[in-house]
Amino acid sequence: MNHPNANRVAVTGLGVICAIGSGREAFAAALREGRSGVAPLWLARAGELRFANAAQVRDFNAEDHFSAKDADMLDRFAQLAVVAAREALAQAGIGLTEELRERAAIVTGSCIGGQTAEDAGFVELYEQGRPRVHPMTIPKTMANAGASAISQDLGITGPAFTISTACASSAHAIGQAFHMVRSGQAPMAIAGGSEAPFSFGILKAWEAMRVVSPTLCRPFSRDRNGMILGEGAAMLLLEPLDAARARGAQPLAEIVGFGMSSDAHHITQPSAEGAAKAIRAALRDAALTPDQIGYINAHGTGTLANDSTEARALGFVFGDQAHGDKPGGRRPAVSSTKAMHGHTLGAAGAIEAAATIIGLQNGFLPPTIHFTEADPECELDVVTNSARVVSVDYAVSNSFAFGGLNAVLAFARAI
Amino acid sequence: MPENQLSDDELTQKILHIVADTQRRDIATVTAESSFEELNIDSMDAVNIVFAVENEFNINVPDEEMRTLKTVRDVIDGVRRLISAQAS
């Protein structure tokens, strides 16, 4: 261990809501079964887009979780954040003492915040010619609305903030919270992310980038043609392993390392070198060697550029192990769960951390569904189409953002 | 004059200007035979060029077609094909 005086950090609660499951149990079952959350896009004017499918949360009704008045005060992305945080806290079964309320941290990630609320306000202003915008537009749009809503909802008054690093936002958030709990700065943290990007204007902007698949997301397949956009939230409850054990809680997993890097390369094109640096940094932080990693939850967006670049990065770090040809070397299995729950942007790191933890805890590796045929540019041991039943000790989850900002989390199976 | 009556030379000139304008290059450095590589045009630059082309000629360029573009000539040929498909 690199940090002799540091706390080991346990995850004792998980909350998840996304296209393949409202709630942790439903999400875990869907991961195990390899269920797809992708369906025809549910939005007015959907027919005016070049893509037809999305991974949306179809069974979420805000008034099942909030009073009508409270629901009005929050954009959907903040509502999802609160629902996931409540579930994580309930599973952890932790009593919020006065001290915990004062010192616990809340760190959330979001890429676009409540831009759907902003979009609706601007439609009224620009298109309908109304003279004013709703007064809640600013507080509903701010990227920290999720963190603020969790703080208010749970009565937690410690450090709370939001990290916005595009598609790595919630991996950065969890990593930051992990370091705060490890160092003793916070005795508990709720960390994760949420996103709800389904407004016509935002989808048009994604269409313009030409990275969204007109069909399905097929990570690492030779015929992949883009990502599928998704929405959702996931929150992890982190506490020192010793504290969890002392109160008789059962850890779901440990977070053992976090690594970051920036590519300094290009605003949208990924860099294998930059990604590899972040993976190496996470392993260094965890004091793990590459051959100890049994599973990689890939960023795996299903775009041409991401998947081949990520495969190269994995080759750099895992060397012969990644290609399975080192005598006695173990080839880490790789999957991208985005094919199931879509690319949830700022929530992706957290939802995929949850998928990684559930796999470690339950002895299976979630599959890369919609896989057709291997791509020679992605020479990896991909877990294709059905979950692989195997117990691994250590796993990493990759998140690589537009803008070249990378965040990688390392997890250990709870023992 | 409607787009479908553009002469080949006019269409070429318009596209050379679009490439030069979007890439902030001197028009003298762009020819129909220039490759994207020579002009230092990466995939995001190409997306920006196609966006401008779509607006200029009122056409929609499919994603698959977009991915095949490697030279200015590819853009000219593709636009001509889409304009005549639209006219017919």
Image: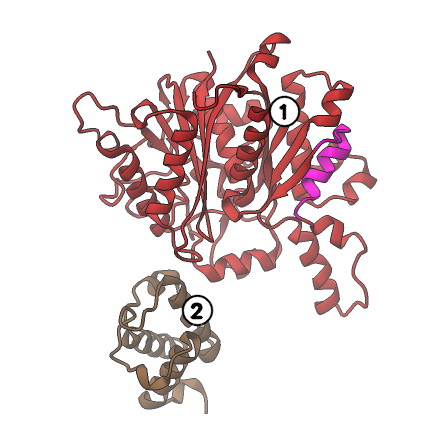
Chain colours: A red, B brown
Residue A328 shown left or right of residue B85 in the figure? left
* Magenta residues, dominant SS class: helix
Q: Name the residue located 32 percent from the left edge and 69 percent from the top edge.
A: B40
Instruction: Answer with the quarter of the image where residue B63 lies.
Output: bottom left
Kindly tell me whether residue A355 is visible in this rendering: yes
Residue lying at the far right of the rendered structure: A69
Q: Which residues are magenta?
A: A143-158
Circle count: 2
Q: Which mark is residue A326?
A: none
Q: Note whether A164 is above or below B49 in the view shown.
A: above
Instruction: Answer with the quarter of the image where residue A174 lies.
Output: top right
The spot of residue A237 in percent (x, y) is 61, 25
Residue A86 shown left or right of residue B82 in the figure? right
Pick the front one: A87 or A190: A190
Tag 1: residue type? Ala
Q: Which residue is mark 2?
A: B48
Magenta-colored stretch includes residue A48: no
How many angstroms separate mark 2 from mark 1 (CA)? 43 Å
Q: Which residue is mark 1?
A: A88
Looking at the rendered image, the quarter that the N terminus of chain A falls into is top left
Kindly tell me whether residue B88 is visible in this rendering: no
Q: Name the residue located 39 percent from the left edge and 30 percent from the top edge.
A: A284
Magenta-colored stretch includes residue A153: yes
Give the secondary structure at mark 2: helix
